[in-house]
Image (spheres, rainbow, N blue to C red):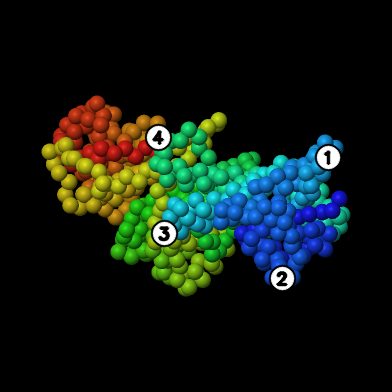
Amino acid sequence: MSKRALLSVSDKKGIIEFAKGLKNAGFEIISTGGTKKALLDEGIEVTGISEVTGFPEILEGRVKTLHPMVHGALLAKHGEESHLRQIEEHGIAPIQLVCVNLYPFQQTIEKTDVTWEEAIENIDIGGPSMLRSSAKNHQYVTAVVDPADYEGILLELAHTGSVSFETNRKLAAKVFRHTAAYDTMIAQYMTELSGEENPESLTVTYRLKQSLRYGENPHQKAAFYEKPLGSLFSIAKAKQLHGKALSYNNINDADAAIQIAKEFAEPAAVAVKHSNPCGVGKGDTIAEAFAKAFEADETSIFGGIVALNRTVDVKTAEKLSGIFLEIIIAPSFTPEALNLLKAKKNIRLLTIPFEAGSNVERRISSIEGGLLVQDSDNAKLDETTTTVPTKRKPTETEWQALKFGWKVVKHVKSNAIVVSNDRMTLGVGAGQMNRIGAASIALEQAGEKAAGSIMASDAFFPMEDTVEAAAKAGITAIIQPGGSIRDMDSIQKADEYGIAMVFTGVRHFKH
């Protein structure tokens, strides 16, 4: 039985060398459109697809391989006498290898000016059909979708004259992953285009960015996957300038740090430990901002992750280099700062395009047996209708501090309380089972600095005890969502101590 290979690729990388190798292995080459032209231009003998089907390419190339002469050649079982008899009756010669990659749908919809008509024209139909047919029949057909596999296939053919069943099965699995991911992107695009918010089924696709040594703990296997059309302002898009590979916990904490850093337009620095901020500061310069973040909690920052929303200069680098940190993330580093920080062997230095902004994305959380999906918490204080139910209104300085605290508490695990002034956090109470517990931790950490500062709470006060504790520590203003059936108790307690309290009407639970 003569051997035939069908090549039809949009990505021409390596295809000439692959075709030549297949020719040397005794394959007849069948091809279509641009691939056929590229091969002919290199002097490679090619049979056109129309010569195989006996039918011309029609409808601007929409129909060329959707034909029994192609799919019969791909789906016939070579070990089944009835299959061989049928294809012989119809003049169909088997195809033993298919090499296809698909129309660039993702690259098309990534363009800012793409029209839906252009997107639709870049939905491949014949390519996935040929790949699926050949992958289904992988006992007899080699299905190739990735140029990275060309060399290995040619080596097998050179050494044994054929491609092994084990290799064909791995290639078939890759094909089905590839076509599933391709169809998922199309489904997502069409779902967004049609305005469906919660479709009857949810399909998502991610690409492997990095295999990880382990997960949260050494006994857990883990990997890091990247969303194909995800936000550029993301740890998944970070460029690593120095240091060893990121761990699972590094990635989680780095994401938490940049989510807080992106809240600030002015120079700001964020220190994170175990996905919670241990210090946040802002200033007129990035060096001043980091000094405030460090001052906020000089103990917890040890071994933490720092994100800064301005270029790291040598003055800031000098402060950073004096502390043991796992990761520093910034838009960029000056050459002098980079050289200084690179002297620390174990630190990881990352850059992220802060100027790119974030996509509006839905958050996916896994539970055993399912997924939870929700919009990102993008609520900003200036987008809410705030009210001041207390007799005293906040001063301008208190307002600035309240805004600062509200930006931070949004990113602290619930129940959450943040004590701050207008420049830095003073105390953070995170992840407690009751609100007074979170407040006690934050106030204890703030110590004497709590006097004259503000308190921010991610959710309403279920009773007056948190206001009482705040007042005794010297807190002068509080910001919280409001909405408790016992709001009046908290309002009266605030009035009793002369505390200004702001209701935002927006809750920031973070679990």
Provide the residue designation for mark 3.
113
Q: Secondary structure at mark 1?
A: helix
Mark 2 vs mark 3, foreground winner is: 2
Q: Secondary structure at mark 4?
A: loop
Mark 2 vs mark 1, foreground winner is: 1
Q: Earlier in the sequence, mark 2 or mark 4?
A: 2
Closest to the observer, 465 or 155: 155
Closest to the observer, 197 or 25: 25
Which amino acid lies under the numbered mark 3 shown in the image of this protein?
A: Asp
Give the side of residue 414 with respect to residue 324, left or right.
left
Which amino acid lies under the numbered mark 2 shown in the image of this protein?
A: Glu
Q: Which mark is residue 42?
A: 2
Which amino acid lies under the numbered mark 4 shown in the image of this protein?
A: Gln
Residue 294: name its quadrant: bottom left
Q: Earlier in the sequence, mark 2 or mark 1?
A: 2
The picture places residue 128, in percent across and down from the top left corner, at: 63, 47
Give the answer, above or below, for where 199 lies relative to 48: above
**Residue beneath the point at 43% across and 70% down:** 314
Q: Earlier in the sequence, mark 2 or mark 3?
A: 2
Mark 1 vs mark 4, foreground winner is: 1
Q: Earlier in the sequence, mark 3 or mark 4?
A: 3
Label 1 crowd bin: few (<14), some (14–19), many (20+), radius 10 Å: few
Provide the residue designation for mark 4.
432
Label 2 crowd bin: few (<14), some (14–19), many (20+), radius 10 Å: few
Q: Which mark is residue 216?
A: none
The picture places residue 238, in percent across and down from the top left corner, at: 50, 58
Circles 1 and 4 in contact, beta carbons < 8 Å: no
Provide the residue designation for mark 1.
85
Determine the CA span between mark 2 and mark 3. Answer: 35 Å
The picture places residue 326, in percent across and down from the top left corner, at: 52, 55
The picture places residue 298, in percent across and down from the top left corner, at: 41, 53
Determine the CA span between mark 2 and mark 4. Answer: 69 Å
